[in-house]
Image: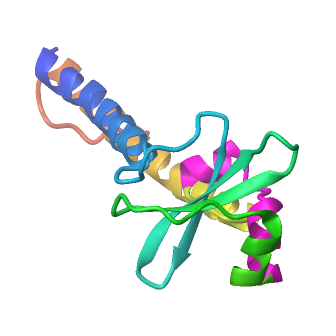
Amino acid sequence: MKWEPIALMVLLPVLGVWLIWVQGMRPGLPEHDPGARLVDFRAGTIRGAVEIAPAADGADTYRLLYRNGESSETMSANEFRNRFGEPLFLAVTNDTSTGLFRLLNITAWAGLAWVAIGLGGQAAFFGRMLIQWVVSEKKRQSVVPEAF
């Protein structure tokens, strides 16, 4: 067997994981407090994160971090609630997304079902190609096996 196709088949998933990893690094956000929790937000064309940091008095402080590198002033919970409204405050403070949801960029369990269906389809078609490739390499000619 030739080594080049195997190297490419290993390189492609590595490239995919690298692209996902780089996307998750939140490019453009200004420095944030290491002990803070970041919750992504999007308002129209503006994207960024809400930094929720514990304060010395036990209450949380809030700050908007924009992807262009700018940030808002630090706000208390009441200031954040008054400025952006109760629904957004509850959405930010009750962030229920899991690491899996963030990794796959989905917001609900139904999205996970669609991702699973898509990945299953990709695995099935990859399996067909892999079977044909292995059999063709063994016979040294292009073959369409019954398992295909």
Dividing the image into 4 quarters, which one contains the C terminus? top left
Q: In the image, is residue 113 above or below residue 2? A: below
User: Along the horizontal axis of the image, is 57 left or right of 13?
Assistant: right
Q: Quadrant of residue 139?
A: top left
Which of the colour schemes (rainbow, by chain, secondary structure, one colour) is used? rainbow
Residue under the point 12% across and 22% down: 4
Residue under the point 36% across and 41% down: 22
Dividing the image into 4 quarters, which one contains the N terminus? top left
Residue under the point 77% across and 58% down: 95
- The span shown in magenta is 86-104
Q: Nearer the viewer, residue 85 or 122?
A: 85
Q: Nearer the viewer, residue 48 or 143?
A: 48
Q: Quick one: which residue is furthest to the front in this view?
A: 57
Residue 102 place in picture, x, y as percent: 60, 51
User: Along the horizontal axis of the image, is 56 left or right of 146?
Assistant: right
Residue 146 appears in view = no
Residue 16 among those drawn in magenta: no
Residue 108 place in picture, x, y as percent: 73, 65
User: Along the horizontal axis of the image, is 142 left or right of 115?
Assistant: left
User: Along the horizontal axis of the image, is 126 left or right of 76?
Assistant: left
Residue 13 place in picture, x, y as percent: 35, 34
